[in-house]
Image: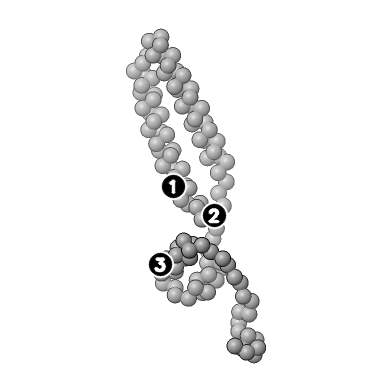
Amino acid sequence: MGAGTLKQRKRGIHLHVMVTQEERDTIRERMTEAGITNAGAFMRKMALNGYVLHVDLTPVRELVSLQRRCANNLNQIAIHANTYGVYPEEIAGLQRDYTELWGKVSAVLEQLAEVVKL
């Protein structure tokens, strides 16, 4: 390619990006899904028109911390109730409810992790 050819190009600046084999395979999969066969066109389209999610997970971390404290408190109450015979059926119900709640919170956290994963 001669110097005259570069001046005629609309895009004269070259960018170079290093990726792992897994990342390259994922890029190719996404190109196929988008119906784009030209890697340069795909990269330009994603860089110019794509988006990057930035999620502040501080509230989620606080939620997890609170959930753990609740679990600890609930276990302490259960031990006390079992030791002194105070409403064991209600405590068992609370434990079941808490287990169900934690399962749902865990599912949400897993989905959130998938969304923010690069």
Q: Earlier in the sequence, mark 2 or mark 3?
A: 3
Q: Secondary structure at mark 2?
A: loop
In the depicted structure, whether residue 25 falls above or below residue 115: below
Q: Residues within 10 Å of mark 1 (few under 14, many from 20)?
A: few
Report x, y in % for residue 41.
51, 74
Foreground residue, 15 or 44? 15
Which amino acid type is shown beneath numbered disc 2? Answer: Leu
Number of the label disc, if any, that sits on residue 33:
3
Quadrant housing residue 14: bottom right
Which amino acid type is shown beneath numbered disc 3? Answer: Glu
Q: Residues within 10 Å of mark 2 (few under 14, many from 20)?
A: few
Report x, y in % for residue 49.
54, 66
Quadrant housing residue 13: bottom right
User: Is 48 positioned to the left or the right of 94 in the image?
Assistant: right
User: Is 2 positioned to the left or the right of 82 in the image?
Assistant: right
State which quarter of the image contains the N terminus.
bottom right
Report x, y in % for residue 36.
44, 73
Residue at (46%, 61%) from the top-left corner? Answer: 22
Q: CA distance from mark 1 to mark 2?
A: 14 Å
In the depicted structure, whether residue 39 falls above or below residue 53: below
Residue at (47%, 47%) from the top-left corner? Answer: 112
Q: Which residue is mark 2?
A: 53
Residue at (60%, 84%) from the top-left corner? Answer: 9
Q: Residues within 10 Å of mark 3 (few under 14, many from 20)?
A: few
The answer to whether one can see residue 65 in this image is yes
Q: Earlier in the sequence, mark 3 or mark 1?
A: 3
Q: CB of mark 1 within 8 Å of CB of mark 2?
A: no
Q: CA distance from mark 3 to mark 1?
A: 22 Å
Report x, y in % for residue 118.
51, 55
Foreground residue, 50 or 5? 5
Which amino acid type is shown beneath numbered disc 1? Answer: Gln
Q: Which residue is mark 1?
A: 111
